[in-house]
Image (cartoon, helix red, strand yellow):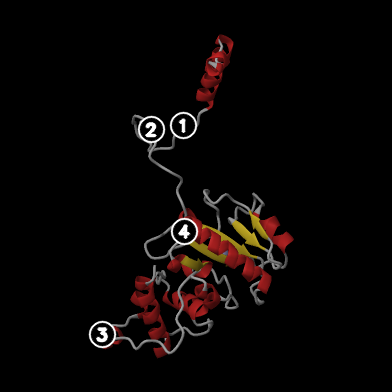
Amino acid sequence: MIARRLFTRPFRALISVLSLLLAGCAVLPQGAGVALEWRPSPNFDERKANFVIIHHTSDDNIAQALGTLTNPLRAVSAHYLIGRDGKIYQLVDERARAWHAGQSKWGNNSDLNSSSIGIELDNSGQEPFPEPQISALLGLLADIKQRLGIPRANFLGHADVAPKRKTDPSRYFPWQRLADHGFGLWCEPPYPVPAPAFEQKFEPGSELQAFGYDSSDLPAAIRAYQRHFARDESAALLSEDDRALLHCLLMKSVALP
Ligand SMILES: [Zn+2]
């Protein structure tokens, strides 16, 4: 009774006018550039990221980093920025495509901006990452992984997905510590001995590519791999140990969820 009384004739008229106005403002769905009929379905949700890409800013302080990442003329951004003191800034909604990875590739994914969350760490690239910053990162990664269900192997660095152009995060970045918390893969010596067949047919380009790296520039891919997993970016070749490490990582990439 009360509800019926609320919907008096003037009120219903107002609702009708508002509905018409809203319909007039409605955003048209994005679609193909061909003639078609729009039949909206209720069965969908928002797209979600399936990778996390970690960067260092190459800046000297947080003010510089915030200035760059919010400047429309620079056309670069990330979803999150973490200061040396551990303060976390959010710059872009996770549902939107931030501009952090640029031209990038990992496995068959050729546009990481479309499928990843980008996290920038305020760091010059020439210095270790302070404890409060890494603690804050671990907390943020745990939250993202739990909410979005991102697989362990899909926590990567910018240089991993753009080895020809990028070197971040630097060799100071604690990948092993991240892997200990379930973010990214890691192997420590002694590595399992690869089967003789692996050694016989070993070809660095195809093995790195099988793991995910774009090996079209093989020395660049090797440097990115060495920087991430061996903390050494000087070696342009893969030693016997490096090959055993890669074999171990390949085994983990198919075995771990
Ligand atoms: Zn980067």
- Residue identified by numbered label 3: 197
Element under disc 3: helix
Amino acid under label 2? Pro
Q: Residues within 10 Å of mark 2 (few under 14, many from 20)?
A: few
Judge left or right: residue 85 versus residue 142.
right
Q: Which one is earlier in the sequence, the residue at label 4 or at label 2? A: 2
Q: Position of residue 222 (x, y in %)?
A: 45, 78
How far apart marks 2 and 3 lie (CA) works out to 53 Å
Task: Check whether the beta carbons of the residues at disc 3 and disc 1 lie within 8 A of each other.
Answer: no
Name which of mark 2 and mark 3 comes first in the sequence. 2
Q: Residues within 10 Å of mark 3 (few under 14, many from 20)?
A: few
Of marks 2 and 3, the one in the foreground: 2
The residue at which mark 2 appears reads as: 40
Question: The disc labelled 4 sits on which kind of residue?
Answer: Leu
Report, in whole angstroms, how far the alpha carbon at label 4 lies from the one at label 2: 28 Å
Q: Amino acid at mark 3?
A: Ala
Relative to 22, is 111 on the left or the right? left
Residue assigned mark 4: 112
Front one among 210 and 176: 176
Q: Amino acid at mark 1?
A: Leu
Q: Nearer the N terminus, badge 4 or badge 3?
A: 4
